[in-house]
């Protein structure tokens, strides 16, 4: 059973919820900043006055993009001075909360827009599984945690909603879709990059045993959904349709398109690194011992990032009932907090960063 490429209510919860609670993607992006700085120094730039194009592929609501864009712009200004125009394009699905994104760009203390009259931010409402800018126009691309999302969900998953808990033919369907989407993402970005340009991609990684660091959270959420079926909050048919299009990859899956010579569509791998990403909420719990606070932070993280995709399987949500969406999110959050507080567990994870260069 296939679903829409873009769920009716988007991937992330709106009204700034992703900005407030996406602590794992934020931390992963910070770990990749040294690679971004090096990529900026390596871009081939001419000496003219043509605008420099920077693209944030998968911006969501903007908060997690601010520091990376600050880093990129600072490095570019050191190279080209203050007068050369720089365009920053934030790309996400049409259903993304762009109102919040523009509010962040305008008023967040960390905004990169202030005090640079030759800096021009913009947004593009289109999936990055399509072309989003003209060929050979992009100097620098940045994508943090966004390419973990598939372009479509290939099939339902019996008994769960994440691909990591699937087996057999179902797992093979997800593996094929993930491989196809990764190649599509890379080929589209290779087409858009200028020769000598750089693309930095940050993604959650899987350990060799297949663990992701958040599997306990996913299993507890799955148990809450079963409780919701039992108490009549959702129908069993709706529960059966719930699938997340998030697919973390192993390092070898990311490298497959580049075999055997490290090249794919004129993209070369310059760097690939896997780093440990500690759970900041767990560090706070170890200091203060507050189970309820830890459970709340983990539950809100799940709600902000994953809840809308699950809710898109509900009949009333599909018909545009905003109250049904809120009820589902509230009920799921309450159940998650209760279960997570029983036996606290950390969400330590791995993050992998790739720096890709288009051959000059």
Image (tube, rainbow, N blue to C red):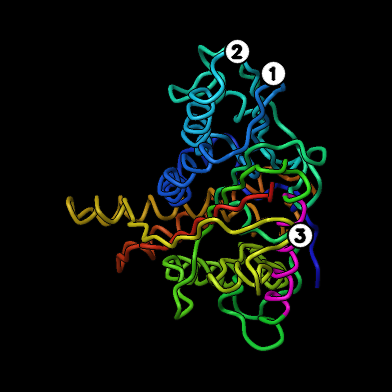
Point out residue 18 in the picture as x, y percentages from the top left corner.
53, 42
Side of 135 where 198 appears, left or right: left
| Foreground of the two, 348 or 322 | 348
Is 297 drawn above or below residue 276 in the view shown? above
Q: Quadrant of the N terminus?
A: bottom right
Relative to residue 294, is residue 166 depicted above or below? Answer: below
The answer, for residue 79, to whether it is visible in the render is yes
According to the picture, the residue beneath numbered tag 2 turns out to be 83
Is the C-beta separation of discs 3 and 1 under 8 Å?
no
The residue labelled by disc 3 is 184
Q: Main secondary structure of the magenta part?
A: helix
The residue depicted at 59 percent of the width and 36 percent of the height is 61
Residue drawn at (36%, 62%), measured in percent from left and top?
Answer: 348
Residue labelled with disc 1: 49
**Cα gap from disc 2 to disc 1, whole angstroms:** 8 Å
Q: State which region is magenta.
A: 173-189
Dot placed on the residue nearer the N-terminal end, 2 or 3: 2
Q: Is residue 87 left or right of residue 20?
A: right
């Amino acid at each position: 059973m296939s679903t829409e490429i873009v769920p009716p209510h988007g991937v992330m919860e709106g009204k700034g919820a992703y900005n407030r609670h996406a602590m794992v993607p934020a931390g992963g992006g910070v770990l990749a900043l040294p690679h971004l700085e090096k990529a900026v120094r390596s871009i081939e730039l001419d000496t003219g006055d043509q605008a420099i194009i920077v693209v944030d592929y998968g911006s969501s609501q903007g908060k997690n993009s601010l520091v990376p864009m600050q880093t990129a712009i600072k490095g570019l200004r050191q190279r080209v001075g203050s007068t050369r125009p720089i365009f920053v394009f934030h790309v996400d699905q049409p259903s993304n909360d762009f109102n919040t994104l523009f509010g962040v760009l305008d008023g967040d203390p960390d905004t990169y827009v202030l005090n640079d009259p030759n800096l021009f931010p913009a947004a593009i409402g289109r999936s990055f599984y399509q072309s989003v800018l003209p060929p050979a126009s992009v100097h620098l691309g940045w994508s943090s945690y966004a390419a973990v999302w598939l372009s479509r969900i290939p099939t339902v998953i019996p008994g769960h909603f994440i691909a990591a808990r699937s087996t057999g033919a179902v797992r093979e369907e997800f593996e094929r879709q993930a491989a196809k989407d990764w190649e599509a993402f890379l080929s589209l970005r290779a087409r858009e990059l200028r020769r000598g340009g750089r693309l930095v991609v940050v993604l959650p990684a899987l350990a060799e045993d297949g663990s992701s660091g958040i599997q306990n959270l996913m299993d507890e959420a799955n148990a809450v959904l079963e409780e919701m079926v039992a108490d009549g909050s959702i129908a069993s048919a709706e529960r059966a349709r719930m699938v997340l299009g998030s697919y973390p990859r192993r390092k070898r899956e990311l490298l497959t398109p580049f075999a055997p010579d490290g090249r794919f569509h004129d993209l070369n791998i310059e760097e690939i690194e896997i780093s440990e990403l500690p759970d900041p909420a767990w560090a706070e719990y170890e200091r203060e011992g507050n189970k309820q606070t830890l459970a709340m932070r983990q539950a809100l993280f799940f709600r902000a990032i994953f809840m809308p995709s699950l809710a898109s399987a509900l009949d009333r949500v599909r018909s545009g009932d905003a109250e049904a969406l809120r009820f589902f999110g509230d009920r799921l959050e309450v159940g998650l907090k209760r279960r997570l507080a029983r036996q606290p567990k950390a969400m330590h994870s791995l993050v992998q960063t790739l720096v890709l260069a288009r051959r000059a």
